[in-house]
Image (cartoon, coloured by chain):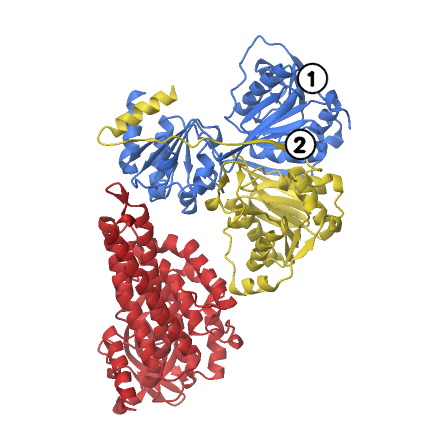
Chain colours: A yellow, B blue, C red
């Protein structure tokens, strides 16, 4: 079972700061981490490998420093790590990003399953996983909270819905996006960390993955940012105190519910 | 590619549950009507499913001018492959300039596959939509990082302009039983329906309660609830307020309540009218999932808990005392 | 914090232990403390992270570090919960006699499972009538052919009942007093070896403490560690090397209490300002921070001295244990004071550090015994 896990390096939520003038995220000096949902994707990939054999390849697209996210993936047990990084990717929207990742996956070629986190916490789109499946023309199961079975070239998985879950069976190769319920991610091991330090991270440029120039980066994107605004800070709230606090809250709630 | 000016009309994909049209569809239709009026074009709705034909009129009443219906047992459930084939085929034929889908889990999944198929621009989870009249572009506004930043996205060069829209963000289309429209029922050939994914079972888990994304009121509990049994009092309050129960990650990790109720970074992003946080300290990972709620009410015994920084109203006190009293007060009044 | 110039592997150990502490230990600490539950879940996490083997030679499945690495790990875990940290460090204490006196065969047999964290270890010296006076041991080991027969009771044994491998001191020749003691390996499940009730403790409540009861317990003679009669000296040598570990546990408690006190002081407002703006609080924090740093310097230096293979390390390791544990007690008490009324409440973290700190002044030689060791070394050296 050859497994590819697509991950993204994102700024640490607890550390988010916004440039009030440029109205964008301050990236300098901000701690970064692997996107939380992607940790579940890595874990599920590792568990399948431990059960069925094979290998897990971590794949990401990003600037050179995204390498540290891949090293973390290796420290958790991923066997290989590939970074696609090129100035030409700058400004990619989800369409261009999923295209670029699909090109890298076509180059990796030999795979049975692709795991992605449900969505990234900075982009928050949940588009890239399904987009990759679209570009590769393989089936997809999103929001997977349990893999029930894998046999005879098929995977049976539980897709979380707004109302409960669907039990779906898909042909392999297949792309799955996972939610938090699926597992509890492991922590790295000391041996893993030592391996991660010495592992060579493969870096591919746009040309290495035969990505068409007009389908990547800003040029290959179908959307662009028109305007960014910061939301006004929430006004200082009112604290109800003393014996009448509950009464005041009841009155307030009734007013709001009218 | 055809000229951008050849694309006309605003389309909406109908979300329904076993033929029951979900409120988010009416919200999309309401918004679509507004956009179509600005653009001077029609609103069309796509209705896919089984035994849904007779629901088309309902969509017309809710402001659709035209409804395309595919009624077939093979698409009883939402599966990305046949849905992508059917919708992309219709779009290639009719060339709408805008396609709106609900930002539900399946809406998001389908929209992305569809955008790849059509090489269209797609924006996720919009809470604001408008038209730039200069160039007829759709201005798609979405919150980033729990609403600390609002980004407006445009797709100038690609059509259709696709957006998924967050439930509860738009007003429902006015229901007018007198409205007339066109219903076109399509018969599609076999090849449209093939899928490499099969549905083995569909399991309802939250049938008896209001689904958290649809709720106007969410009563949410955190670590301060101490144990699973105490969530009962949140359910009671939610019930009298006709709301749903939410939870912080801590409460879910303690297995006091299932993951489907989790609000926040690794759970759901919600924006109800009223969000009542009980015994939730307000870690940033939680706040990003709920701070765009209209009104936030915090009940926590720690006055320095960060939840009070985002709360419009708060009580510093014991949830186990305050929540039952609130429930009782509302029960008495109803 | 002073830069102690850790190497890459040491930094990795520290960071990994810190991550485990933040993500797994700290959120669960209050629960384990309240229910006196043995933290198997966390033992599993530590095992999976390869951390049970940091001080064990690579040829026995470890990571090839020493007492210093063990101290780094123990310090980090103790910041979150000294009781949970003790399950870890008491295993090292149980393993050390084996590392120091075991044959290659004995090490091959037992160390890899300890390094993998599959089997916990424990050290059994203390008896109801033999605490600080370790020479008053009553437990006997009588040689009968290919076996030894153990009889007697050990008490207050950390990891007792949960560990699977025990290193036990028993008298092989009572006539000879301290020189008649020997060291044995006993596995859980050996007939005649049972456990008394679990003690209810003031602090370190996640850690288990039980009596070990030997009733005609028959063990093969291959389970003798070293030679007959070396038991007492082996125990003392083991303590010389293990004391920095207790120092590290105390250091972690002190640092953890300081961190909590600082965090609380920053957000606590009185008289309309943060209490950190008051000099009374500032001075307390300054003293706490300085004492913690001094304790760390002593613990790290003595651990490094042990690893460097120096002789006559006994009084330095005694200083490290004694000083760090006295600091832990004082800093934890001060942390409770800074928390004020909240500090006295179970719901806030301060009081647990105070309860946990106390034992570090008592076990593995009370601090009075440590002073004896230090003074004896001082006087002996001055004669030379």
Q: Provide the secondary structure element on which disc 1 rests.
A: strand
Q: Residues within 10 Å of mark 2 (few under 14, many from 20)?
A: many
Q: Earlier in the sequence, mark 1 or mark 2?
A: 2
Nearest the camera: C71 or B249?
C71
- x%, y% of residue B267? 49, 40
C110 and B278: which one is in front? Answer: B278
Q: Position of residue B285 (x, y in %)?
A: 45, 42
**Residue B18, picture quadrant:** top right
For the C terminus of chain A, the image quarter is: top left
From this viewpoint, which residue is outermost toward the right?
B1
- Between marks 1 and 2 in the image, the one whose residue lies nearer the viewer: 2
Chain of the residue displaying label 1: B
Rendered view: B56 above or below C242? above
Do the dots labelled 1 and 2 sit on one chain?
yes
Q: Position of residue C333 (x, y in %)?
A: 24, 59
C380 shown above or below B298: below
Picture quadrant of residue A191: bottom right
Residue in the image at 59% along x and 28% along y: B140
Secondary structure of the residue carrying numbered label 2? strand
Q: Residue at x 52, y 59 (%)?
A: A188
Is residue C258 rendered to the left or right of residue A150?
left
Which label sits on residue B184? 1
Q: Give the image quarter of residue A195.
A: bottom right
C350 and C222: which is toward the camera: C350
Q: Is residue B6 left or right of residue A114?
A: right
Q: Which residue is mark 2?
A: B121
**Residue B55 visible in rendering:** no
Quadrant in the picture for the N terminus of chain A: bottom right
Task: Say few, some or many: other residues with alpha carbon within 10 Å of mark 1 (under 14 / 14 to 19 / 20 or more).
Answer: some
Residue C290 % position (x, y): 32, 63
């Amino acid at each position: 079972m050859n497994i590819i896990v697509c991950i993204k390096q994102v700024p640490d939520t607890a550390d988010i700061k916004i440039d009030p003038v440029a109205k964008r995220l301050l990236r300098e000096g901000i701690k970064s981490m692997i996107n939380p949902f992607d940790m579940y994707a890595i874990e599920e990939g590792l568990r399948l490998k431990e059960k069925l054999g094979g290998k897990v390849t971590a794949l990401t697209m990003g600037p050179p420093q995204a390498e540290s996210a891949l090293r973390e993936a290796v420290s958790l047990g991923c066997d290989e790590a590939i970074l696609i990084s090129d100035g030409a990717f700058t400004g990619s929207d989800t369409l261009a990003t999923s295209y670029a990742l699909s090109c890298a996956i076509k180059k990796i070629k030999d795979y049975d399953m692709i795991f992605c986190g449900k969505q990234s916490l900075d982009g928050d789109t949940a588009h890239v996983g399904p987009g990759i499946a679209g570009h590769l023309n393989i089936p997809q199961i999103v929001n997977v909270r349990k893999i029930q079975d894998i046999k005879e070239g098929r995977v049976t998985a539980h897709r979380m819905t707004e109302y409960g879950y669907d039990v779906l069976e898909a042909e392999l190769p297949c792309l799955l996006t996972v939610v938090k319920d699926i597992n509890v991610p492991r922590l790295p091991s000391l041996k893993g960390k030592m391996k991660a330090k010495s592992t060579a991270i493969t870096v591919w440029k746009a040309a290495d993955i035969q990505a068409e120039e007009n389908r990547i980066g800003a040029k290959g994107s179908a959307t662009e940012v028109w305007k960014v605004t910061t939301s006004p800070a929430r006004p200082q709230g009112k604290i109800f105190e003393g014996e009448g606090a509950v009464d005041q809250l009841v009155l307030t709630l009734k007013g709001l519910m009218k | 590619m055809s000229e951008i000016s050849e694309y006309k009309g605003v389309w909406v994909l109908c979300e329904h549950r076993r033929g029951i049209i979900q409120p988010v569809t009416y919200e999309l239709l309401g918004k679509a009507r507004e956009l179509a009026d600005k653009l001077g074009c029609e609103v069309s709705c796509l209705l896919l499913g089984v035994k849904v034909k007779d629901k088309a009129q309902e969509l017309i009443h809710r402001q659709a001018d035209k409804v395309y219906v595919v009624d077939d047992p093979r698409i009883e459930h939402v599966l990305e492959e046949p849905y992508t084939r059917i919708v992309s085929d219709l779009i290639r034929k009719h060339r709408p300039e805008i396609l709106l889908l609900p930002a539900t889990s399946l809406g998001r999944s389908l929209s992305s596959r569809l955008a790849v198929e059509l090489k269209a621009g797609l924006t996720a989870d919009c809470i604001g939509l408008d038209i730039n009249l200069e160039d007829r572009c759709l201005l798609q506004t979405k919150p980033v990082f729990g609403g600390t930043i609002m980004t407006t996205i445009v797709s100038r060069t690609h059509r259709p302009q696709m957006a998924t829209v967050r439930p509860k963000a738009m007003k429902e289309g006015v229901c007018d039983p007198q409205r007339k429209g066109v219903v076109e029922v399509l018969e599609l050939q076999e090849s449209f329906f093939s899928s490499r994914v099969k549905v083995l079972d569909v399991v309802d888990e939250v049938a008896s309660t209001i689904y958290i994304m649809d709720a106007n009121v969410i009563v949410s509990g955190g670590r301060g609830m101490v144990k699973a049994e105490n969530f009962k009092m949140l359910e009671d309050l939610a019930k009298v307020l006709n709301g749903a129960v939410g939870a912080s990650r801590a409460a879910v990790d303690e297995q006091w309540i299932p993951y489907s109720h989790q609000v926040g970074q690794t759970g759901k992003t919600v924006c109800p009218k009223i969000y009542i946080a009980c015994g939730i300290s307000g870690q940033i990972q939680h706040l990003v999932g709920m701070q765009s709620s209209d009104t936030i009410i915090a009940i926590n015994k720690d006055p320095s808990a960060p939840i009070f920084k985002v709360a419009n109203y708060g009580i510093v006190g014991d949830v186990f005392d305050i929540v039952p009293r609130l429930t009782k007060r509302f029960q008495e009044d109803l | 914090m002073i830069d102690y110039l850790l190497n890459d592997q040491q930094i990795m150990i520290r960071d990994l232990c810190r991550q485990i502490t933040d993500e797994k230990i700290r959120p669960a600490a209050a629960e384990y403390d309240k229910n006196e539950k043995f933290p198997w879940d966390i033992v599993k996490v530590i095992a999976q992270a390869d951390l049970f083997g940091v001080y064990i030679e690579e040829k026995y499945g470890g990571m090839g570090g020493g007492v210093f690495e063990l101290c780094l790990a123990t310090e980090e875990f103790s910041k979150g919960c000294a009781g949970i940290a003790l399950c870890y460090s008491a295993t090292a204490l149980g393993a050390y006699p084996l590392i120091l006196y075991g044959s290659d065969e004995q090490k091959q047999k037992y160390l890899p499972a300890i390094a993998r964290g599959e089997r916990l270890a424990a050290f059994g010296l203390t008896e109801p009538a033999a605490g600080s006076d370790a020479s008053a041991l009553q437990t006997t080991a009588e040689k009968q052919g290919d076996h030894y027969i153990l009889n007697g009771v050990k008490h207050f044994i950390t990891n007792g009942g949960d560990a699977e491998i025990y290193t036990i001191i028993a008298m092989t020749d009572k006539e000879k007093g301290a020189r008649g003691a020997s060291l044995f390996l006993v596995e859980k499940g050996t007939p005649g070896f049972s456990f008394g009730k679990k003690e209810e403790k003031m602090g370190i409540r996640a850690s288990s403490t039980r009596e070990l009861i030997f009733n005609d317990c028959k063990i093969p003679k291959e389970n003798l560690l070293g030679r007959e009669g070396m038991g007492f000296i082996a125990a003392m040598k083991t303590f010389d090397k293990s004391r920095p570990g207790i120092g590290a546990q105390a250091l972690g408690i002190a640092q953890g209490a300081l961190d909590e006190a600082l965090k609380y002081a920053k957000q606590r407002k009185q008289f309309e300002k943060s209490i950190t703006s008051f000099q009374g609080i500032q001075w307390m924090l300054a003293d706490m921070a300085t004492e913690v740093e001094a304790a760390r310097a002593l613990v790290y230096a003595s651990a490094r001295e042990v690893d460097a293979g120096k002789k006559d390390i006994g009084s330095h390791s005694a200083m490290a244990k004694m000083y760090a544990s006295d600091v832990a007690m004082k800093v934890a008490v001060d942390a409770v004071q800074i928390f004020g009324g909240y500090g006295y409440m179970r719901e806030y973290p301060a009081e647990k550090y105070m309860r946990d700190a106390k034992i570090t002044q008592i076990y593995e030689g009370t601090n009075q015994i440590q002073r004896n060791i230090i003074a004896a070394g001082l006087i002996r050296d001055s004669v030379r």
